Image (tube, rainbow, N blue to C red):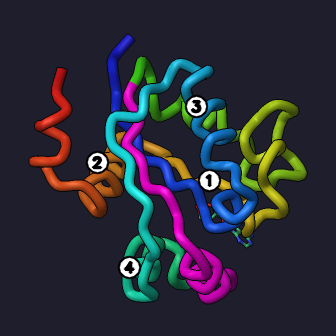
């Protein structure tokens, strides 16, 4: 199996719940390693650009508002099959439909306030990592 990198956001709802540690513990227990991490308050322009793929969806405006309401933690995660593994650990987008023990079941509230974001494919992982972290940030962490 390949060692991959994926991108994660601990969203404003989970940060507000004081769940940065709880979320990160689930990621680590699942076999993922945090190799870069930073707390940021997204600007409206950043949130719009990050979620541009959803710009025609009815929830886009509310999503941008939510993602800018408080600080988030952006992270790069590394591990075997990290992209799929992270999605399993997060659980379904809608916390009401997420399996027991997943991050979204434990810490999410509803389909919008769902605690975490994770990349869905290798191409988006690369784009999303590059949105927040420079090559120099990551090169310094190469093992
Ligand atoms: P995320 O994995 O960050 O990707 C896009 C986000 O849009 C998603 O998590 C949810 O927070 C939000 N989202 C997706 N579908 C809906 C929906 N039907 N209604 C409201 N928000 C949604």
Above or below for 22 versus 47: above
Tally of numbered discs:
4
What residue does disc 4 label? 46
89 sits to left or right of 6: right
| Label drawn at residue 116 | 1
What residue does disc 3 label? 27
| Label drawn at residue 126 | 2
Above or below for 23 versus 48: above
The residue closer to the viewer here, 126 or 136, is 136
**The image quadrant in which ligand 1 is located:** bottom right
Residue stretch in magenta: 58-78
- Cβ(mark 2) to ligand 1 < 8 Å? no
- Mark-to-mark CA distance, 4 and 3: 25 Å
- Specify whether residue 61 is painted magenta: yes
The residue closer to the viewer here, 83 or 13, is 13
In terms of sequence position, does the residue under pointer 1 or pointer 4 come before the other? 4
In terms of sequence position, does the residue under pointer 3 or pointer 2 come before the other? 3
Determine if residue 30 is in view: yes
Q: Residue at x 68, y 39 (%)?
A: 22
- Mark-to-mark CA distance, 1 and 4: 17 Å
Residue 37, position in %: x, y?
38, 48
In terms of sequence position, does the residue under pointer 1 or pointer 2 come before the other? 1
Q: Residue at x 17, y 47 (%)?
A: 137
In terms of sequence position, does the residue under pointer 2 or pointer 4 come before the other? 4
Q: Mark 3 packing: few (<14 Cα in 10 Å), some, or many (20+)?
A: many
Q: Secondary structure at mark 1?
A: strand
């Amino acid at each position: 199996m390949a060692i991959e990198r994926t991108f994660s956001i601990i969203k404003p709802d989970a940060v507000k719940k004081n769940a940065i540690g709880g979320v990160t513990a689930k990621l680590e227990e699942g076999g993922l390693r945090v190799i870069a991490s930073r707390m940021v308050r997204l600007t409206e322009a950043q949130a719009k650009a990050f979620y541009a793929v959803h710009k025609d969806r009815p929830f886009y405006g509310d999503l941008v508002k939510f993602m800018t309401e408080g600080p988030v933690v952006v992270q790069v995660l590394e591990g075997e099959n990290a992209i799929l593994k992270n999605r399993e650990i997060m659980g379904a987008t809608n916390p009401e439909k997420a399996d027991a023990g997943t991050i979204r079941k434990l810490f999410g509230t509803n389909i919008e306030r769902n605690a975490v974001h994770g990349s869905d494919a290798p191409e988006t992982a690369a784009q999303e990592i590059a949105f927040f972290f420079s090559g120099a940030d990551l090169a310094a962490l190469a093992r």
